[in-house]
Image (cartoon, helix red, strand yellow):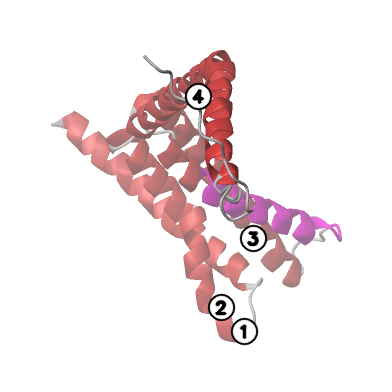
Amino acid sequence: MGKVVAQILLWGLILSLLAFTAIRTLHFLGLTFPADQSYMSWLGLAAFDGGVLLWFFFATRAATGHWQTGLSYLMIAVCMLGVVICTVADMLLVSSGNGLVHLPPNTAIVALYGVIAVIVINVVAGTVVHLLSPAHMQHMAEERARARIQTRVLQNIEGRADAIADDIAERLGAEWEQQAYRNMTGLLPSPKKKGIVVAEEPTQKS
């Protein structure tokens, strides 16, 4: 019973802090959109606080094979890094606006590049993780095997073609020669049309 209560309390703490960081992330992402498009920051939340939960759920419930599992846990760390960047940047910017701290001029730019990197990595990883599934990798291995077999078949055909090319060429050449004789000699005029009298061969007397 105590173990269950401890897990509930721990998850309550994690979700509470994620709610806090999500608010900070939404505020920081909202600064990168025009005023009439601030709602778009909710979509970006999927790469940060939402990404932590989604990648965690995928890693523990759906990932198969060491490639998918390894990438999933790596993306949990990447999303956590994004949450840290957004939370720290937003708190510093707001505190600076309230006169609490003085920030270096490039702080917002560095944070912005970090946010962009996290979003791009999530897009790439979301595509790659499906390509790394064991079923897809098996399919690709089978396709590579078929391609190798087909290559060997084509090479074998070409080798056999070289071996029989001379014989086939000789036969086709002879056939063409006979066909040419038949076609061309048919154009010659008959002896009667030219006025030529063909002498009959004498018959032998018995």
Of residues 130 and 40, the one drawn nearer to the viewer in this rendering? 130
How would you classify the magenta stretch by its main secondary structure?
helix
x and y percentages locating residue 134 in the rendered image? 35, 28
Q: Which residue, given by chain and number where applicable, does mark 2 sit on?
A: 38
Residue 123 shown in magenta:
yes
Residue placed most toward the observer, 174 or 191: 191
Disc 4: which residue: 154
Given this view, does label 1 or label 3 mark the residue nearer the observer?
1
- Front-most of 102 and 172? 172
The residues bearing labels 2 and 3 have C-alpha atoms spaced at a distance of: 18 Å
Q: Mark 3 to mark 4: distance in Å? A: 65 Å
Q: Which residue is mark 1?
A: 35
Instruction: Name the residue carrying label 3.
Output: 91
Q: Amino acid at mark 1?
A: Ala
Task: Looking at the image, tell me whether mark 2 or mark 3 is earlier in sequence order.
Answer: 2
Give the mark toward the camera: 4 or 1. 4
